[in-house]
Amino acid sequence: MKNSIQPGLETTARIIVDAARVTRHMGPELGVYGTPALLGDIEHTCHDLLQEHLDEGEDSVGTRADLLHLAPTLEGVEVTIVAKVTAVDRRAVTFEVTASDPYDELARCTHSRFIVDKDKLLERIENKAARVKGNT
């Protein structure tokens, strides 16, 4: 992990709400940007910001999200996501994130990510897979 990960580091992502991001569980006429898709876009924005500041063999995983989804956004509308690093505690990084469309503030989120060594994570995954396989 590079020393460049510091509070104040910020990025902006722009996303068009496509059909895959729209939830239609209330019927087709009430289709809007779904909260799970919004959270995924927030996670990807924060992940992508960190990627530029990681050493080879490192990546990050999401560990927490406190999301307040404030307004609906329709399919085809552009959403702007602004993610700002607010805290760095060793390998834990916290972000404050806002999302808006041209008409409303869409969301506020506090999101935490943890920087991992990919080889160590793979080892943990393989160990768990062996335990799972042993129980089937």
Image (tube, helix red, strand yellow):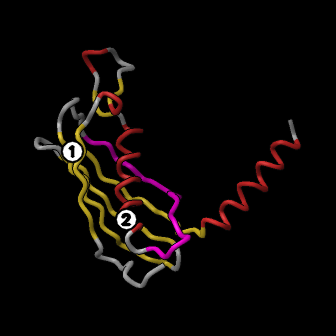
Q: Identify the residue shown where x is 34% and y is 77%.
A: 7
Q: Tag 1: Cα neighbours inside 10 Å, few (<14), some, or many (≥20)?
A: many
Question: Which label is found at residue 23?
Answer: none
Q: On screen, 57 above or below 31?
A: below
Q: Tell me which amino acid carries mark 1.
A: Val
Judge whether residue 58 is colored magenta: yes
Specify the quadrant of the image occupied by residue 121. Answer: bottom right
Which quadrant of the structure image shows residue 70? top left
Instruction: Give the numbered dot on residue 79.
Output: 1
Looking at the image, which residue is at 52% across and 59% down?
A: 61
**Is the stretch drawn in magenta largely helix, strand or loop?**
strand
Question: For this rendering, which residue is in front, 105 or 8?
Answer: 8
For the point 37% across and 60% down, the residue is: 48
Q: Position of residue 128 (x, y in %)?
A: 77, 52
Please report whichever mark, 1 or 2, sits nearer to the chain's N-terminal start: 1
Is 31 situated left or right of 44 in this image?
A: left
The reply to whether callout 1 and callout 2 are in contact (CB within 8 Å) is no
Q: Secondary structure at mark 2?
A: strand
Q: Which residue is mark 2?
A: 95
